[in-house]
């Protein structure tokens, strides 16, 4: 009988593992393909179109993944004696472990070319025809392949396949442990892209010369610290000062080698000048640990669009700088602005960073323009914007500039122009940007969406202005549980546990990813390890209820063990923000919590599956898997986009902790009662 199904007795475990591998690789390949095809906002579409495409891909993935999962469960259940749904879930986790590692070390590291990614896509489609009983599948493979090919065609069209950088010539590409780098050239203008986003252009003489507005705050320019590698012409401007010494804090050494090798001279001469030194490591930590007394600290991160960039514009980082640097040290950075009067969106974006800055620095000046230059110091006599004083400092240092002259300074430092910053100084609308509440990149999303005047801008603004609705949204699952107290609707209780499994798993894992980036830097090279530990934990956690014999005493034992794991995970997440220093301990704690988070999620799913089968003598793999995917998708949308940026990680954790406790109490003592 088993031979007729196409699944040999010794290969059914491999079949299930292949499913998990394919599912994870396919889920991970979609955003990677977007990155390679460079589906840039503004070029062909807005946020809403991208969201619609993402929803389409999610539907197709659920059809493919859910249909294949249910088909495998039914096949294994029909032609073997193993516990079908629960066992498949465990083995699928092991396959997903392999898929996660494969995704990280192959897709993210060794596939810089979009055509190679296309071959990966076709390979995944081919793997869908793995040997099994096709009659038991909810969707025939040929139908799924057809739908996927339609989706791929849409993605190709939106992504301008084969025309990634329009008229620019690609000079070089490479992958590092932190990012995917691309260097292009058009009419002798070079542009560096990091993960598909523009990093800087070279040469840009006028923008580079604006560095003097910072350096002319002191007559004697000596020790300068820079966070992140900047364009070479900016370094060349700094090296005009006779005694200037520059220490650049950067974590990606391959980036420097890439720029020196492929940018035309004199770029390499600027980067390799003896007056320029490099500190390889996490700039967030190292800049305050090297013991140097810097005259200037310059942040070369132009826009905090993610958790890594955000942490350099938070109260937490400004506190580190303020407590370790001399009072007369000048902090400088620039952010995208507007040469005209700023609107409310830009005011709130810049205001949230200003609010963070003024909590730790007493003297702050803002120079409006296309780029808003922020100057801060704890010495009230340090920062001046008098044109004559700045020009005198220029003469004393013997500096020659092309654009930044008396005419430029008279315009940029004009009283009317400086008054534009009053909207930021006097703002009371913006929140304070912190590591645990990275609200700045939510405001940045609103700014980006405002370029398209579409529905996405209204949606983002609605949630920003009605944050109280987020708290109601968090408690909707809790309110829905009141209907489950009726004994006539006991079965949905089991599906709600699976919903919690998906919701909690993604919530905890995404929280760990954000915490990792906020406290330890770029997570790019650690994704495989975090995913791997999560999937190992899911497999082991899912295996725990399989040992239950169906009796009340055994079910209680495994329930209490799962509850303890959940409490420990939430407690560990809560103390990460409390740990100062102890970076290696934070690293180990995040790895351990990733493992336990997967274990908690896997345990919840199989606890519900085993309990359901013991009570009703049957299984409902389709509905269980649907509830799990629904919880995971909702968590993926709301946790990272709304909850953490708008109300903060601490509030989300506290509310989720209360929700979790009430959830398990209801299921343990009221609904299931085993």
Image (cartoon, helix red, strand yellow):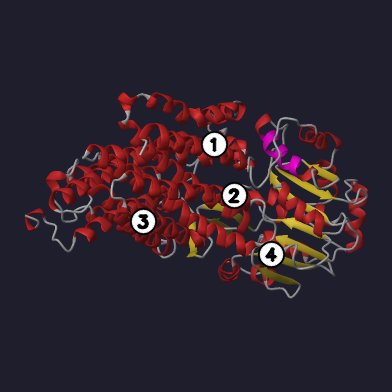
Q: From this view, report whether residue 257 is shown above or below residue 7.
A: below
Q: Nearer the viewer, residue 624 or 419?
A: 624
Residue density around tag 2, few if under 14, some if 14–19, many if 20 or more, within 10 Å? many
Q: Is residue 656 left or right of residue 95?
A: right
Expressed as whole percent of the image width and height from the top left, the position of residue 227 reads 70, 59
For residue 347: magenta?
A: yes
* Disc 4 target residue: 249
Expressed as whole percent of the image width and height from the top left, the position of residue 240 reads 80, 66
Image quarter in which the N terminus is found: bottom left
Expressed as whole percent of the image width and height from the top left, the position of residue 405 reads 83, 51
Residue density around tag 3, few if under 14, some if 14–19, many if 20 or more, within 10 Å? many
Label 1 to label 4: alpha-carbon separation: 42 Å
Foreground mark, 1 or 2, reads: 1
Whether pointer 3 and pointer 4 mark residues with C-beta atoms closer than 8 Å, the reply is no
Please give the name of the residue rendered at 22% of the width and 49% of the height, measured from the top-left corner: 84
Image quarter in which the C terminus is found: top left
Q: Secondary structure at mark 3?
A: helix
Q: Which mark is residue 307?
A: 2
* Sequence-first tag of 3 and 1: 3
Q: Which mark is residue 658?
A: 1
Foreground mark, 3 or 1, reads: 1
* Sequence-first tag of 2 and 3: 2
């Amino acid at each position: 009988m088993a031979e007729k199904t196409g699944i040999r007795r010794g290969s059914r475990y491999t079949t299930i593992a292949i499913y998990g591998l394919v599912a994870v690789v396919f889920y991970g390949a979609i955003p990677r393909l977007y990155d390679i095809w460079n589906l840039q906002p503004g070029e062909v579409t807005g946020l809403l179109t991208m969201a619609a495409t993402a929803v389409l891909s999610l539907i197709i993935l659920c059809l493919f993944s859910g249909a294949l999962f249910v088909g495998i469960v039914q096949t294994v259940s029909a032609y073997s004696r193993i516990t079908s749904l629960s066992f498949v879930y465990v083995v699928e986790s092991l396959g997903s472990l392999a898929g996660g590692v494969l995704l990280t070390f192959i897709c993210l590291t060794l596939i810089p070319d979009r055509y190679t990614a296309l071959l990966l896509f076709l390979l995944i489609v081919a793997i869908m025809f793995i040997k099994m009983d096709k009659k038991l599948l909810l969707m025939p493979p040929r139908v799924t392949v057809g739908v996927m090919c339609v989706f791929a065609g849409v993605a190709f069209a939106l992504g301008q396949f084969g025309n990634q950088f329009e008229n620019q010539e690609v000079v070089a590409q490479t992958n590092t442990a932190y990012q995917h780098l691309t260097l292009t050239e058009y009419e002798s203008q070079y542009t560096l892209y990091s993960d598909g986003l523009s990093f800087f252009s070279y040469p840009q003489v006028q923008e580079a010369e604006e560095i003097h507005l910072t350096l002319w705050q002191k007559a004697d320019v000596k020790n300068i610290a820079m966070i992140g590698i900047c364009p070479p012409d900016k370094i060349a401007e700094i090296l005009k000062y006779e005694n200037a010494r520059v220490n650049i804090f950067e974590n990606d050494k391959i980036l420097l080698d890439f720029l020196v090798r492929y940018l035309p001279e004199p770029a390499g001469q600027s980067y390799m000048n003896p007056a320029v030194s490099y500190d390889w490591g996490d700039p967030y930590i190292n800049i305050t640990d090297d013991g140097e007394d810097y005259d200037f600290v310059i942040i070369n991160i132009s826009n905090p669009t993610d958790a890594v960039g955000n942490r350099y514009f938070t109260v937490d980082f400004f506190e580190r700088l303020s407590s370790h640097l001399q009072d007369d040290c000048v902090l400088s950075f620039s952010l995208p602005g507007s040469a005209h009067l700023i609107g409310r969106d830009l005011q709130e974006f810049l205001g949230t960073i200003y609010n963070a800055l003024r909590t730790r620095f007493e003297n702050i000046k803002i120079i409006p323009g296309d780029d808003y230059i922020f100057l801060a110091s704890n010495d009230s006599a340090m920062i001046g914007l008098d044109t004559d004083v700045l020009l005198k400092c220029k003469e004393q240092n013997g500096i020659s500039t092309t654009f930044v002259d008396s005419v430029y300074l008279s315009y940029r430092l004009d009283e009317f122009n400086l008054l534009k910053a009053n909207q930021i100084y006097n703002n009371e609308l913006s929140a304070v940007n912190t590591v645990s509440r990275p609200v700045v990149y939510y405001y940045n999303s609103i700014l980006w969406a405002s370029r398209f005047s579409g529905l996405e801008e209204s949606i983002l603004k609605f949630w920003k202005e009605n944050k109280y609705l987020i708290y109601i949204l968090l408690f909707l699952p809790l309110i829905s549980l009141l209907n489950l107290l009726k004994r006539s609707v006991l079965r949905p209780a089991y599906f709600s546990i699976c919903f919690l499994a998906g919701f909690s798993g993604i919530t905890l894992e995404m929280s760990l990813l954000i915490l990792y980036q906020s406290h330890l830097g770029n997570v790019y090279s650690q994704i495989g390890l975090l995913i791997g530990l999560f999937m190992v934990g899911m497999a082991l956690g899912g295996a725990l209820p399989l040992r239950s014999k169906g009796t009340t005493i055994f079910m209680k034992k495994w329930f209490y063990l799962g509850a303890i794991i959940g409490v420990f995970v939430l407690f560990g997440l809560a103390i990460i923000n409390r740990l100062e220093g102890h970076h290696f301990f934070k690293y180990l704690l995040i790895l351990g919590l990733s493992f336990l988070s997967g274990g908690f999620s896997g345990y919840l799913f199989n606890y519900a599956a085993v309990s359901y089968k013991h009570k009703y003598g049957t299984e409902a793999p389709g509905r269980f898997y649907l509830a799990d995917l629904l919880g995971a998708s909702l968590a993926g949308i709301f946790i990272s986009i709304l909850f953490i940026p708008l109300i903060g990680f601490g509030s989300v954790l506290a509310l989720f902790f209360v929700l979790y406790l009430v959830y398990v109490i209801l299921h343990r003592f009221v609904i299931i009662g085993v």
